[in-house]
Image: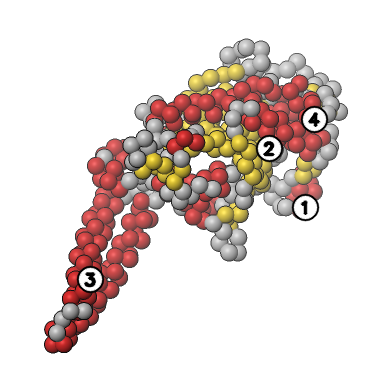
Amino acid sequence: MLDIKFIRENLEIVKLAATKKKIKVDLDRLVTVDDARKAVMTELETKKAEQNRVSADVATATPEVRTQLIQEMQTLKASIQADEEKLKPLMDEWKGLMLQVPNIPDMSVPDGDSDADNLEIKVWNPDGATEAPAPKPFPMKDHVELMTALKMVDFERGVKVHGFRGYFLTGDGARLSWAIWNYANDFFGQKGFEQLLGPTIVRKSNLYGTGHLPNDAEDLYFTQDDDVLIGTSEVSTMGFYADEVLDKAVFPIKHLAFSPCYRREAGSHGKDTRGLIRVHEFFKVEQVVLCEASHEESVRLHEEINRNTEEFIESLGIPYHTVLNCGGDIGQGQVKKYDIELWVPGEKTYREISSASYFHDFQTRRFNIRYKDESGVMRYAHSLNCTAIPTPRILVSLVENFQQADGTIVIPPVLQTYFGKAKIG
């Protein structure tokens, strides 16, 4: 959430940000409502001050004057109640508009309408090539065919139990997921991240805090109590520090958060319906960072956490490229975002596996996460997050890239200790 003072003083810049992010919000209406809100609040403050003055005078007034003052207080009370009733719809509209105002994207964010306009900034292959991998010298199978033949997945029983997009990871499929989680825990733990396991059912306020509400409501699962099942552990991890004043000396705070995640995939019916690319429930290891209110520090840490995931993918030996997301493909709160996409031989394309974003104080204002700087001034912290690794999606690229001509799958060397063997099949 941006500060209303900043919005008013930089209205044209905020309008340009909304245009770049393809977000519709009536900023002129926001200013009008804010003017009305402030006028009523000023009137209320004046009347309440007068009410306090009259109340104090009552104690020392003569009986005749006291009667007159009590009548004044009753009139003031009625007027205050009327103003409070007038303020309530203004505040509701003001809050609704404020929740729609986007953060200002970095100048390096390219223009564009969708992920098709993202800018490729890096290509990595184990053999050092700087282009997409060449086809292997044998007929390639996709992950569905490979994993089904090796009894690593059962989609039929998954659909029977869960419904559309259901799956069971079985045998070596489940075992491989555990190997990846355990390897990720060690890999990112060595980079100074503290492990965190948090709630997956949270209050809606946490989704407003991260910016997933109100915009992503159709993609969320709600409980009968109107709580929410998280789609990323970023949500509960940020909520961990809500309404706290942190010690600046502990920055940067780095958490490696692990959780099951739930997404309805609303609006994607008919898209990626086959296999493990787009499922309703999955597991994710997430890097979540809080730091001091410094753009330079946010930029440094953004590059660092994105590079952490690149190094993790490189250690597995899976080809990937990294893209800089365009204005139309970054969220309301993000200042800048990178996506890492893994090569999927069966589709001859790259598929997103990780997103790295920084937000400045957009999220921490909503969560009220603050600290005192060296001068004793209270400031909102900055926040960042980046996917460390999601399962089962990574299995798609892993099994397809490491398949052999005989239908077996070689396990990347760094995973063999965790997995317990060098090959499946």
Residue type, numbered disc 1: Lys
Whether tag 2 and tag 1 are in contact, CB under 8 A, the answer is no
On screen, residue 94 above or below 388:
below
Q: Residues within 10 Å of mark 1 (few under 14, many from 20)?
A: few
- Residue sticking out furthest to the front: 60
**Residue 277 falls in image quadrant:** top right
Residue 24 screen position, x and y as percent? 37, 46
Disc on res. 419: 4
Is residue 12 visible to us here?
yes
Sequence-first disc among 3 and 1? 3
Label 3, label 2: how far apart the Cα atoms are: 61 Å
Which residue is depicted at the point 17% across and 79% down?
A: 60
Label 4, label 2: how far apart the Cα atoms are: 15 Å
Secondary structure state at the residue bearing disc 3: helix
Tell me the quarter of the image containing the C terminus.
Answer: top right
Residue 335 screen position, x and y as percent? 42, 35
Residue 402 screen position, x and y as percent? 75, 23
Left or right of residue 81, residue 212 in this image: right
Residue type, numbered disc 4: Phe
Which residue is depicted at the point 53% across and 19% down?
A: 122
Sequence-first disc among 3 and 2? 3
Is residue 266 visible to us here?
no
Sequence-first disc among 4 and 3? 3
Left or right of residue 329, residue 55 in this image: left
Disc on res. 160: 1
Q: Residues within 10 Å of mark 4 (few under 14, many from 20)?
A: many
Label 3, label 1: how far apart the Cα atoms are: 67 Å
Sequence-first disc among 2 and 1? 1
Label 4, label 3: how far apart the Cα atoms are: 72 Å
Q: Nearer the viewer, mark 1 or mark 4?
A: 4
Left or right of residue 298, residue 175 in this image: right
Disc on res. 391: 2
